Amino acid sequence: MTSFRCVKCSSQQESDGLDVSCERCGSAVVVADVAPTAVTRSELEDQPSGVWRYRAFFPGLGPEEVVSLGEGGTPLLRAERLGAELGLRDLMIKDESRNPTGSFMDRGSTVLLSLARSRRVKECTCITTGNLGASLAAYCAKADIKARMMIHQSTDQGKLYQMLAYGAEVEPLSSRPLLRDSHGGSLTVTAANPYLLEGEKTTGFELIQELGWQTPDVIVVPVGTGGHLRMIWQSIAQFESASLIGDSHCRLLGVQVKPTPYGGTKSRIKRGSQVDLPLAELEESEPSFRREANRAVAESGGMMLATNSRDILAATSLLAKTEGIFAEPSSASVVAALSDAVRSGYLRSSEKVVCVITGAGLKDPKAISRLARRARQPAPGDPYARPSPGIGATKIALLRLLKIHTAYGYELRKLLAPDRRMSTASVYQHLTELEEFAMVRRRETVYARGRERIPYELTRRGAEFLRVAGKLERVERKQAG
Ligand SMILES: [Zn+2]
């Protein structure tokens, strides 16, 4: 049995379940803070790097078989060029995009899925905006557990491809809320799962250990649900109480997109003057750990910073160009916020600052294309400056045509754009990308009238993607109407 504490009403409860929420008020719970097994610095240093190095801090968890893809142990990089740009002499980046599925969520997935497998869970259902689903799908594959993902409309395309690639069953989340129905062999997971959070606190343990058992002056973290930030704060407290570090004076800066639920408003980020970026990972309309995150920031003497999507896009580009780290925009928000914090004088240039970059940029093709357009500095009236027509409309149209029959690129161009508003080369580019996602494949080259022709056909994965895309569209139409 493990002890849990409700983040809202603070009531304590014991449970051996994996999907625990407060018995009294239904809110999220966290594993109650208990003293870890006595452990020394050298014992921790002797363990291989990664999440499981900190097993002593997962109370009551002792899975015999760890389900691991080599998560954690991510580099803490000195960011001299970015620091010079921002006016910070001692800036470092904890690069969580190096995790197996490209996000910090893998730290939680290894803990939860290890427990799930040891408890003989057969099926895992997850409600997700993206990164969590991609991560759980990979760990379910490794653990031989069936994965069912209920995705939000705002889910980024790259993350959807990841889920499908890892063999998850993907369904759009309908307006009807999914009942939490964990039982016997079935487990329902949300980002508020307390065991996911236990794994997430290792981001903090690692960066402290890498800094020679010291906390930096400031840690900057995207807020999201508030869980990761809260757990990084707890990691400092747990290292202090285990006497692994002395008293810390580390401030936490939480970063959110404005307007924001943390400030009390619930509006979305769409505003005329702003770039409409898909920031699903930051845009939590009801962050489960809002109070806890606010409390952590206040206790540390830090602050919550808000930034906008235009600055985030610029920050994504700056981070990539100065440090070679291509982060997803919701992660690069920390860089945008830092720049504000320095300008306002909140941060001194000599302070040791660690930015946590939580996820990889390749997951978010919409943002990539917007960055590319930004690089081209589009003039007004430039057709590329128009908003993209939804999630991969051209690719979906190509897949639909291929569902009917096998076709060549030229043929597809004629069917798709009889008015020639799209070139055959661009159709081939889309086909190549679809091929990389294993949604289409080439058949044997045909020679007709002296010309080489490559027929393309739909794969099973392509057909599965179309099925999900169709369902998503129906849900969107229903919700719009
Ligand atoms: Zn409660």
Image (tube, rainbow, N blue to C red):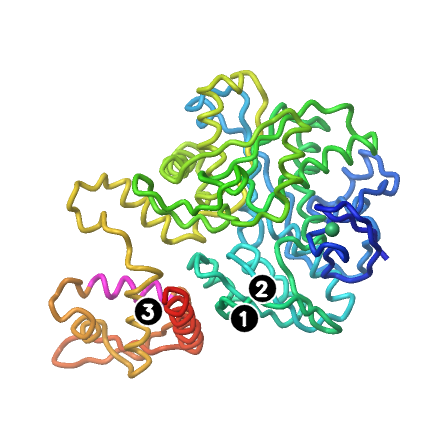
User: Can I make out residue 164 in this image?
Assistant: no
Dot 3 or dot 2: first in sequence order is: 2
The residue that appears at 65% across and 56% down in the rendered structure is 109
Residue furthest to the bottom:
405
Q: Position of residue 127 (x, y in %)?
A: 57, 62
Q: Amino acid at mark 3?
A: Ile
The residue that appears at 35% across and 47% down in the rendered structure is 276
Dot 1 or dot 2: first in sequence order is: 2
Q: CA distance from mark 1 to mark 2?
A: 7 Å
Q: Which residue is mark 1?
A: 167
Q: Position of residue 262 (x, y in %)?
A: 54, 39
Q: CA distance from mark 1 to mark 3?
A: 20 Å
Q: Comparing marks 1 and 3, which lies closer to the viewer?
A: 3
Q: Which residue is mark 3?
A: 396
In front of the other: 353 or 300: 300
Q: Which residues are magenta?
A: 425-435
**Which secondary structure, mark 1?**
loop
How packed mark 3 is, by other alpha carbons closer than 10 Å (few <14, some 14-19, many 20 or more), is some
Q: Amino acid at mark 1?
A: Gly
The quarter of the picture where the N terminus appears is: bottom right
**Which secondary structure, mark 2?**
helix
Q: For the residue with label 2, is its CB less than 8 Å from the closest atom of ligand 1?
A: no
In front of the other: 16 or 418: 16
The quarter of the picture where the C terminus appears is: bottom left
> On the picture, is 276 further left or further right than 89?
left
User: Can I make out residue 203 in this image?
Assistant: yes
Q: Which residue is mark 2?
A: 137
Q: Amino acid at mark 2?
A: Ala
How packed mark 2 is, by other alpha carbons closer than 10 Å (few <14, some 14-19, many 20 or more), is many
The residue that appears at 78% across and 62% down in the rendered structure is 17
